[in-house]
Image (spheres, grey):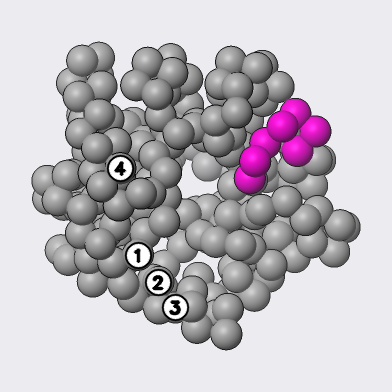
Amino acid sequence: MGSVNCATDPLKVVQDALSEGVTMLQFREKGSGCLQGAHAEKLARDLQSVCAEYNVPFIINDDIELALKIDADGVHIGQEDGEPAMVRKRIGNKILGVSAHSVSEAAAAIDAGADYLGVGPMFPTSTKSDTRPVSGPALIQKMRQLGIDHPLVGIGGITPDNAIEVLRAGADGVAVISCISSSPDPGAAAERMKNVLLEARC
């Protein structure tokens, strides 16, 4: 999430979400009205501090320079955000997540050193305006059937109502933005998602 995704104070949103079970935070400060420069860096550092309190990894979307500057736990890049192999060289042993929209993209990312793959879009989403065509949980299922055993995280349009489909297809987890950050009660939204995922694993 980023500041533009939050219905209330981003720090409060993150604190509430982490207190109810969110296991990783990706800082994605993009979109109309987003913070830039020193303001974005300050928010990143503040959110990083909250994550440290909960012992939760803090990664940054796309901005490798910022991730290195503040010593974030890692970065997540899309297909248009640079070569994964080059990013791996720059960040060393930090977490590297790569978005994959096909089996071939997944295989290339794994070969380049990705620690996990963000696979999608699972469902239509209004958070991003530049998304690829919806692939659905079937893409994760196909990756598993073809022997990809890397950690897979479903992305795009995921809510507590459809998350179980993503895990049943073979995902290890889900990435969400608006269903938690835009909720009037982020903590309750995070708890509901956590319970759905626990149920799916059972």
Secondary structure of the residue carrying numbered label 3: helix
Q: Earlier in the sequence, mark 1 or mark 2?
A: 1
Q: Residues within 10 Å of mark 2 (few under 14, many from 20)?
A: some
Tell us which disc is closer to us: 1 or 2. Answer: 1
Res. 54 visible in picture: yes
Compute the Cα span from label 2 to label 4: 20 Å
Inspect the image, locate mark 3, and give the three-letter code of the amino acid beneath it. Answer: Val
Above or below, comparing residue 151 to residue 185 in the picture: above
Mark number for residue 174?
Answer: none
In this rendering, would 190 be left or right of 11? right
For label 1, the residue is 21
In this rendering, would 166 be left or right of 24? right
Is disc 1 in contact with disc 2, using a CB cutoff of under 8 Å?
yes
Above or below, comparing residue 183 to residue 188 in the picture: above
Above or below, comparing residue 135 to residue 35 in the picture: below
Inspect the image, locate mark 1, and give the three-letter code of the amino acid beneath it. Answer: Gly
Q: Earlier in the sequence, mark 1 or mark 3?
A: 1
Compute the Cα span from label 2 to label 3: 5 Å
For label 4, the residue is 52
Is disc 2 in contact with disc 3, using a CB cutoff of under 8 Å?
yes
